[in-house]
Amino acid sequence: MEKLAVFVKRKRKEASLTQADFALKAGVALTVIRKIEQGKGNLNLERANQVLKMFGHELAPVNSKTLLSPDRIEKP
């Protein structure tokens, strides 16, 4: 949850939005944004994606075997 908190807060500030403005644009309660940025509370996938879509991102299940496959690692 910490990485999500840092990401959301950084992106919100880059967009020059207050927490209240961001919550309004994302269609979530201000308390949701506050909890995310503080790394607190239980956040379901739907609510997380509602917030992340503001930045063109989303959370989704990933097969860890595929993610860590050597053929998926970029070589210099």
Image (cartoon, rainbow, N blue to C red):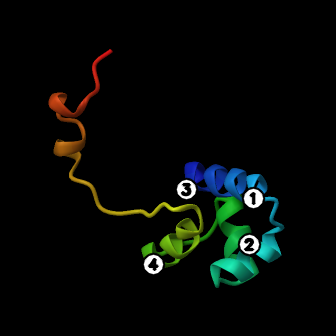
Q: Residue furthest top?
A: 76
According to the picture, the residue beneath numbered tag 1 turns out to be: 15
According to the picture, the residue beneath numbered tag 4 turns out to be: 46
Q: Is residue 34 left or right of residue 39?
A: right
Tell me which numbered mark, 2 or 4, is placed earlier along the sequence: 2
Residues under labels 1 and 2: Cα distance? 9 Å
Q: Dot 2 surroundings within 10 Å: few (below 14), some, or many (20 or more)? A: many
* Towards the viewer: 44 or 20: 20
Residue at the (41%, 62%) spot, across then down:
59
Residues under labels 3 and 2: Cα distance? 19 Å
Q: How far from the left and from the top, in percent, is residue 13?
A: 78, 55
Tell me which numbered mark, 3 or 2, is placed earlier along the sequence: 3
Residue at the (59%, 68%) spot, across then down:
54
Q: Hey, which quadrant is residue 4 in on the image?
A: bottom right
Residue at the (74%, 69%) spot, across then down:
34
Q: Amino acid at mark 3?
A: Met
According to the picture, the residue beneath numbered tag 3 turns out to be: 1
**Quadrant in which the C terminus appears:** top left
Q: Mark 2 or mark 4, which is nearer to you?
A: 2
Q: Dot 1 surroundings within 10 Å: few (below 14), some, or many (20 or more)? A: few
* Towards the viewer: 59 or 41: 59
According to the picture, the residue beneath numbered tag 2 turns out to be: 22
Residues under labels 3 and 4: Cα distance? 15 Å
Q: How far from the left and from the top, in percent, is residue 53?
A: 52, 69
Residue at the (29%, 26%) spot, across then down:
74
Q: Amino acid at mark 2?
A: Phe
